[in-house]
């Protein structure tokens, strides 16, 4: 299997063999249950669907209840598909743990949803310097974008122009994070550095 679903617990730091203090993120990865196996013959593509995090039955729709019963598991909160042909590795109802997937892995990719920062201006969102200066009557332009560059042609603003707008709250993948430690008994993975998202948010770990 190429990955697991997990939850960001928070950040800590550990000491390596040389006594160097390494900042790292603690992720609770799995256990995940195989709830569906998609094949090219039936679905047009090959993938394995994993489910993670317990959910009460009263909060589950009838359709999802039947979906989980078919896999022989209790209702789960998060479902993710990993695209590839893993039919020889797993079967419906299997439970995958961090030891099964990341037991000998040194580097992983982590996908998460970044923290939403609301509507922000160009200085915070794109790192603009601002118009700057308070001479020549400028008293309220310090953090403004300045000229947008359009004149009589094209008489419009090009799509993709860096301007103020919604910042954060988007899917982000951080690649090649070093696995510092795996704690199988607690389903924990410690990766070097920070990952997107708030504490308690779901993340996808890819091998």
Image (cartoon, rainbow, N blue to C red):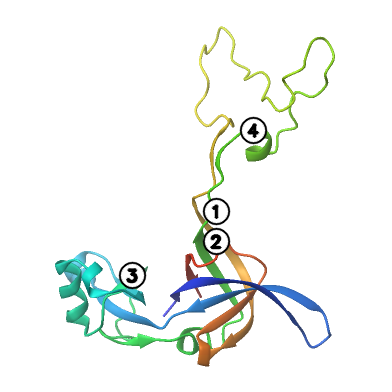
Query: Which mark is nearer the camera, 3 or 4?
Result: 3
Contact between marks 2 and 3 (CB within 8 A): the answer is no
- Which residue of the protein is positioned furthest toward the top in this rendering? 152
What residue does disc 3 label?
A: 77
Mark 1 vs mark 3, CA separation in Å: 20 Å
Mark closest to the chain's N terminus, 4 or 2 = 4
What residue does disc 1 label?
A: 115
Q: Is residue 143 above or below residue 97?
A: above
Helix, strand or loop at label 3? It is strand
Residue drawn 66% across the image and 25% down it? 145
Figure quadrant of residue 37: bottom left
Query: Which mark is nearer the camera, 4 or 1?
Result: 1
Mark 2 vs mark 3, CA separation in Å: 18 Å
Mark 4 vs mark 1, CA separation in Å: 18 Å
Mark 1 nearby-residue class (10 Å; few <14, some 14–19, many ≥20)? some
- Which residue of the protein is positioned furthest toward the front in this rendering? 58
x, y percentage for residue 33?
33, 81
Mark closest to the chain's N terminus, 2 or 3 = 3
Mark 3 vs mark 4, CA separation in Å: 37 Å
x, y percentage for residue 197?
54, 60
Q: Depth check: 105 or 135 in front?
A: 135
Contact between marks 2 and 1 (CB within 8 A): the answer is yes
Mark closest to the chain's N terminus, 4 or 1 = 1
What residue does disc 2 label?
A: 198
Query: Which mark is nearer the camera, 4 or 2?
Result: 2
Q: Is residue 159 above or below residue 2?
A: above
């Amino acid at each position: 299997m190429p990955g697991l679903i997990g939850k960001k617990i928070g950040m800590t730091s550990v000491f390596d063999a040389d006594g160097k203090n390494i900042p790292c993120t603690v992720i609770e990865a799995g256990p995940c249950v195989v709830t569906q196996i998609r094949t090219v013959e039936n679905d047009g593509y090959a993938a394995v669907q994993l489910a993670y995090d317990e959910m009460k039955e009263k909060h589950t729709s009838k359709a999802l209840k039947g979906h989980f019963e078919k896999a022989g598991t209790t209702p789960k909160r998060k479902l993710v598909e990993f695209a590839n042909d893993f039919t020889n590795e797993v079967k419906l109802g299997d439970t995958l743990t961090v030891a099964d997937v990341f037991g000998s892995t040194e580097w992983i990719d982590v996908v998460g949803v970044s923290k939403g920062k609301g509507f922000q201006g160009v200085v915070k969102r794109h790192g603009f310097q601002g118009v700057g200066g308070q001479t020549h009557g400028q008293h309220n332009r310090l953090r403004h974008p300045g000229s947008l560059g359009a004149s009589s042609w094209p008489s419009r603003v090009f799509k993709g122009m860096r301007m103020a707008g919604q910042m954060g709250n988007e899917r982000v993948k951080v690649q090649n994070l070093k696995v510092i430690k795996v704690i199988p008994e607690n389903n924990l993975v410690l990766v070097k550095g920070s990952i997107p998202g708030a504490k308690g948010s779901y993340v996808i770990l890819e091998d």
